[in-house]
Amino acid sequence: MDHIDRVLLAQLQEDATQSYAALGQAAGLSAGAAHERVRKLRERGVIRRTTIETDPAALGGAVLAYVMVDATSWMGDAAQDFVALPEILEAHIIAGSASVLVKVRTASTEQLQDVLRRIYAIDGVSRTQATVVLETFFERPLSPRTPEQA
């Protein structure tokens, strides 16, 4: 991936609805060349999908929590059990004091409690520890630019 690809990715992360002409202008390319570069980034899996960013509170997800899940057995085979809970936005097998880290969004702490019950019901889960977020300073995607370009 070269500097031009990184410029295109940064532009798309800022606004994925930009025209290829606008992308090309930002990267010093023609619209056709920008389109071809973006197509190749998709083919290589660098761009996984194009989506929108929504306000979680407006969609009923005002409560954000990170949950550490302890287990009595390897949880790598339990991925589908976590996927089945729609309130779980991310789930990661981790090293350290817990086995799995999940990111959960719910409308209320009561709903969070229900999600914790459902996580606890997953085979092998022995304990959960939730940390509720009070305020988010910022969230950002991974920058396609290298540190020296920032």
Image (cartoon, rainbow, N blue to C red):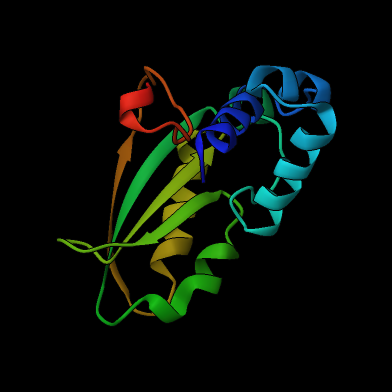
Residue 123 location, x and y as percent?
41, 79
User: Which residue: 38% across, 59% down?
Assistant: 92
User: Which residue: 58% across, 32% down?
Assistant: 4
User: Which residue: 47% across, 45% down?
Assistant: 104
Across the whole image, how many numbered discs are drawn on residues?
Answer: 0
- For the residue pair 116 and 26, the one nearer the viewer reads as 26
User: Which residue: 65% across, 49% down?
Assistant: 41
Residue 15 location, x and y as percent?
68, 22
In the image, is residue 83 above or below residue 1?
Answer: below
Quarter of the figure with residue 61: top right
In the image, is residue 55 above or below residue 78?
Answer: above
Q: Is residue 84 left or right of residue 40?
A: left
Residue 21 location, x and y as percent?
82, 22
Q: Is residue 31 left or right of residue 73?
A: right
Q: Is residue 39 left or right of residue 142?
A: right
**Quarter occupied by the C terminus:** top left
